[in-house]
Amino acid sequence: MTRYADPGSPDALVSYRSRYDHWIGGDYVPPARGRYFENPTPVNGRPFTEVARGTAEDVERALDAAHSALPAWSRTSPAERAAVLLRIADRMEARLEPLAVAESWENGKPVRETLAADIPLAIDHFRYFAGVIRAQEGSLSQLDEDTVAYHFHEPLGVVAQIIPWNFPLLMAAWKLAPALAAGNTVVLKPAEQTPASIHVWLDLVSDLLPPGVVNVVNGFGAEAGKPLAASPRVAKIAFTGETTTGRLIMQYASENLKPVTLELGGKSPNVFFDDVSAAEDDFLDKALEGFTMFALNQGEVCTCPSRALIQRGHYDSFLQAAIARTEAIVPGHPLDTATMTGAQASNDQLEKILSYLDIGKQEGARVLTGGSRAALGGELAGGYYVEPTILEGTNRMRVFQEEIFGPVVAVTPFTDFDEAVSLANDTLYGLGAGVWTRDANTAYRAGRAIQAGRVWTNCYHSYPAHAAFGGYKQSGIGREGHRMVLEHYQQTKNLLVSYSPKKLGFF
């Protein structure tokens, strides 16, 4: 096991600048109003850098730069754009550990996750879309002997991208890779809780991108996010975050008739049928890990399997094993590779989670394990830590219906297939779901019946670049990943061409 040195210490793999301005037009630009805000690490609650506090004036400067860069970038060949994405991926892979440490320090997640998942997946998205854009083709339709319809894929233009704090670099890659591959230029606003990771990435790859192709404006939602989303100068808005903010983004976009993609909240069911416990084998062990995935990234995942539905025939035995597996989770310093759960991303998020634990208790939910703030002490004193928590109750409780975004799972039994599907679908959300069974027919039927954009079957929390991801119901509009996402960053140009010298004959 490895314990990486804290950023800024003598043996650290990465160090942050003392201050980050906006990245506009290929250079760092101070905020128009001269204001900055502190960026604390969740590891111990202490600030480690300060960041420009953007406003509408900064957004306009970034849009100027993006529009200036658009004509040249949009005319580059798919092969040239693909080559840039591949160089970015190679550069990231060569510096995987520093990027992983930087994100863990800023976000609080265990470095074992950033090393094994976040950064490798981000790299894979750049490589995937480099391949996809080279393989994409237009179409030709011969309408008659003398008339042909040509269809070309063209970039939308300057796109706005607003990303969340739970996966700063991966969420940036999810949006940047297809947008850049398609020939768009970008103004990106990172979450105010985690802006520094993006700038560490920029320090690594900015020389590979023409100035103005990617611009980053830091700041808060009302001050920087709103003017970006409401601007008539953007051709599209991509947003990942909570559902209430997504509604506002959609409202801003509607004023200018701009397309949006929204990846929003979730309250994902994880369904365990009786036959999961038919044998004590690798499959049962895998299913127990699948249950415990609610604690991945401290539960700060839109698809967190935060509702565990367990069939009555094995309810007691499976739940006891799941409690034991949960209690075996190792908390600790996020930069220690032995640590399985780290810190929540911010004090605000910590307080939200703790308030929901109180709500659950008041509603009559039974705490089976956890249920409190984790006091780790020592160098971690002041950090934002919560015990992985299992609550037992009914699906009508708020802790079953509302997104907590923390390491909390609400558990309830079901009797048969129909009740499982009914409980799974009894939610406003429809982002993700899990189905666990040894029976292929049950797996297929349940996967088709559950109203969610992705249904993991005998697995959970896998996010390959070539699998479409997105929500049903209140969980959003559009998709991330897979070649279909290019359609969200392109428009279709039709040339309807007549090769006949003769007139139609109407006039």
Image (tube, rainbow, N blue to C red):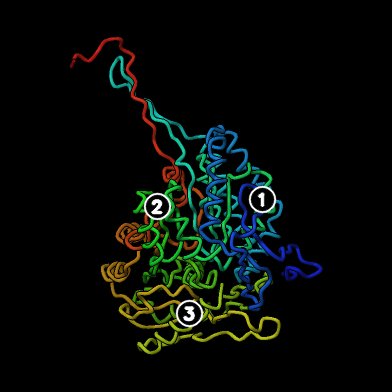
Mark 3: which secondary structure?
Answer: helix
* Horizontal and vertical percent position of residue 107: 60, 69
Which is more N-terminal, label 3 or label 1?
1
Quadrant where the N terminus sits is: bottom right
* Horizontal and vertical percent position of residue 365: 38, 86
Farthest-out residue, front: 33
Q: Identity of the amino acid at label 2?
A: Val
Residue wearing tag 1: 27
- Categorize mark 2 by other alpha carbons within 10 Å: few (<14), some (14-19), many (20+): many
Residue 102 in the figure: left or right of residue 262: right
Q: Identity of the amino acid at label 1?
A: Asp
Farthest-out residue, left: 506
Query: Does 477 appear above or below 81?
Result: below
Q: Residue at x 63, y 68 (%)?
A: 106
Residue wearing tag 2: 260
Mark 1: which secondary structure?
Answer: strand
